[in-house]
Amino acid sequence: MSRSRVRERERVRATVHTTDPAALAAYAGALRPVVASLRTLVEDATAAPSKRVHARAFLRREILRGIRELEARIDAAAPPAP
């Protein structure tokens, strides 16, 4: 695995301080591009087959990748279980 992928994975899983309003706002801002990307992919996936831009396999792979990224970021912000 390349170093850039490792750094990206560490960045995504970095702890989020939800008690700090500035940190929480920065966290929410970082989620916006992920959600926007997912929205575009889902709109393409649900378009009529003749109007689709990408292949179904590509759309499925990228949507699942986006969902995994959201899950990792939510897990980083969730308080640890007791």
Image: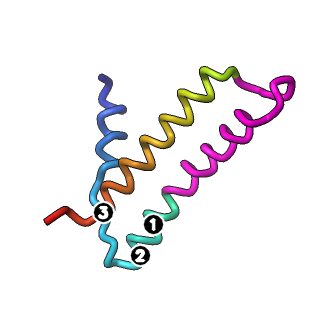
- Which residue is at 40% across, 79% downward? 21
Residue 69 drawn at (x, y percent): 43, 44
Give the labeled residue for mark 1: 26
Q: Which is the main secondary structure of the residues drawn in magenta?
A: helix
Residue 12 drawn at (x, y percent): 36, 48
Image marks 3 and 1: residues in contact by CB distance under 8 Å:
no
Instruction: Report whether 73 appears left or right of 67.
Output: left
> Label 3 sits on what residue type?
Ala
Give the labeled residue for mark 2: 22
Tell me the CA gap for discs 2 and 3. Answer: 17 Å
Q: Which residues are magenta?
A: 31-54
Residue 67 drawn at (x, y percent): 48, 43
Q: Quick one: SS at disc 1?
A: helix
Tell me the CA gap for discs 2 and 1. Answer: 6 Å
- Which residue is at 62% across, 29% downward? 59
Camera-nearest label, 3 or 1: 3
Give the labeled residue for mark 3: 78
* Circle 3 residues within 10 Å: few <14, some 14–19, many ≥20: few
> Label 1 sits on what residue type?
Ala
Q: First in sequence: mark 3 or mark 1? A: 1
- Which residue is at 34% across, 78% downward? 20
| Viewer-side residue, 41 vs 11 | 41
Above/below status of 6 relative to 35: above
Q: First in sequence: mark 2 or mark 3? A: 2
Camera-nearest label, 2 or 3: 3
